[in-house]
Amino acid sequence: MAPASASPAPGTGRAEPTGPARHDDELRLVPLRHVPLIRKGDDLADLMVRACMESGVVPEAGDVLVVAQKIVSKAEGRLRRLDEVEVSPRAEELAVLVGKDARLVELILAETERVVRAVPNLLIVEHRQGWIMANAGVDQSNVGAENDSLALLLPEDPDASCRRLRSALQERFGVAIAVMINDSFGRPWRNGVTGVCLGAAGLEVLRDCRGRPDLFGRPLRHTDIALGDEIASAASLLMGQADEHVPAVLVRGLRVAARSNETARDLLRPADQDLFR
Amino acid sequence: MAPASASPAPGTGRAEPTGPARHDDELRLVPLRHVPLIRKGDDLADLMVRACMESGVVPEAGDVLVVAQKIVSKAEGRLRRLDEVEVSPRAEELAVLVGKDARLVELILAETERVVRAVPNLLIVEHRQGWIMANAGVDQSNVGAENDSLALLLPEDPDASCRRLRSALQERFGVAIAVMINDSFGRPWRNGVTGVCLGAAGLEVLRDCRGRPDLFGRPLRHTDIALGDEIASAASLLMGQADEHVPAVLVRGLRVAARSNETARDLLRPADQDLFR
């Protein structure tokens, strides 16, 4: 199996398959397993370089490195001890309604712009960074051996985290790769969580297809593709949610454009344009 | 690059990587390009067998073949001529409100259980099969050279289509593969469409992770993973929405269970359990 052609044609973000091999145009996702448990202050770029080496993977221009939100949060020191949380009257009240630990609710509210839905066993909020999600992403799974006494917040600014990591990796590998942080969100109408793009750097996260021709030359109308979320979902397939030990995935063979000015925020639909609401 | 290990361990749906090659555990998606334009009555199994051959791909047990909704709909004769549509007064009225062709709205209503949202330029409905989606999936892109005079409906029963195709392919290839039909839906709160699983046969579409241990042995709570939609999104990355000419993708290396009793309907959240609504 020949490696996929990873370099998009300049300016277009897409390229015709090149070379003689049959599967030059396939999409490959390589799990990076050799990552130790992460602690505050760990150098993620360094750990990713080692993980690539130990997996025998050499990043190429056009690759996308997808990193799980949890290891970014841990490295950035977003772990909180519940016994150090001061609970406000508002959190106390909401905790009774949703049936959660009031200290956890306090952490959630501190990350929250507005509460979207609060019923027993469920607290859906608009995160200060714009995501509509359960518990503002505050999570107690895979956080540490002390289990119920710890909770992990989302990274302060995932796009900025991606930019930093991308720049460090570019220096180490000498090639331009894109970096994404993914997470898993629930969604209305459909069961189960799917991967979403929480942060991105150097990547086309949203493709505007308006004006592109269909198979018959008819211009497409109104179709934007959320490439960022589709890549995040693809990587999630290898990461899982439990004890898979795959905190990062290298994606090769995407025909997406390198975009220095797009971020995961481009995937957030402004409330006044959200016709589903 | 060695082929990925494709056979899940019996009963578990997951397997440890086997063999000496470094990337035995990678996930691979191979685009199947050699598919002619589809007409009503075409034998999809036959066309898929040829596409695999011409792409030099031999399906293995555990592979998932993802087929774009459009070619299934076309083969099943779901193309409609707008000039043969009789428009009801209700469609006429709704067409004025949303600013669409009344014949198109008539086709949409015939597929619709209830209208969820109707405003200028947007008609969101609950499809008779349970999906909440724009225009009941009735689409005019990539349908044919006569462009504005044709519209394509979703398959009558995508799960049944997948079962038929799976059974035919199993006979041809002599191995058990799973089959999925994917489509692209918009969603609330986030920009852009993503791939969704519209039909499935022989595939674990929803993984119930409750009770599974996290990295630290703490049981996970409440996490179902919508594997079907994540696979659909991954395949969408190769299919695109415009003139990519990739109507099918073979996915290899998933560690998902072969499930004969799960269908894409398992991804539909019953309204009374939908706490986002």
Image: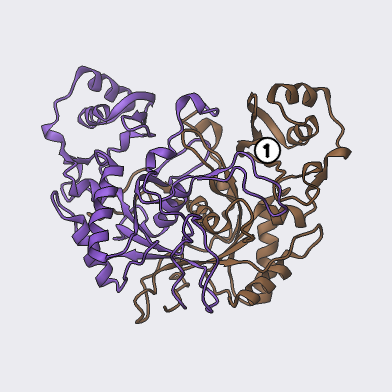
Chain colours: A brown, B purple
Mark 1: which secondary structure? Answer: helix
Residue A51 sits in quarter? bottom right
Residue of label 1: A136
Residue B142 visible to an observer of this rendering: no
Residue occupying the far left of the picture? B84
Identified at 71% across, 34% down, the residue is A112
Subunit of label 1: A
Q: Is residue A273 above or below residue A206?
A: above
Residue type marked 1: Ala
Q: Is residue B13 above or below residue A270?
A: below
Q: Is residue B196 left or right of residue B154?
A: right
Q: Is residue B215 above or below residue B1?
A: above
Q: Position of residue B222 (x, y in %)?
A: 60, 38
Residue A34 visible to an observer of this rendering: yes
Identified at 17% across, 51% down, the residue is B145
Q: Position of residue B47 (x, y in %)?
A: 20, 61
Q: Position of residue B148 (x, y in %)?
A: 20, 41
Identified at 78% across, 26% down, the residue is A91
Q: Nearer the viewer, residue A252 or B50?
A: B50
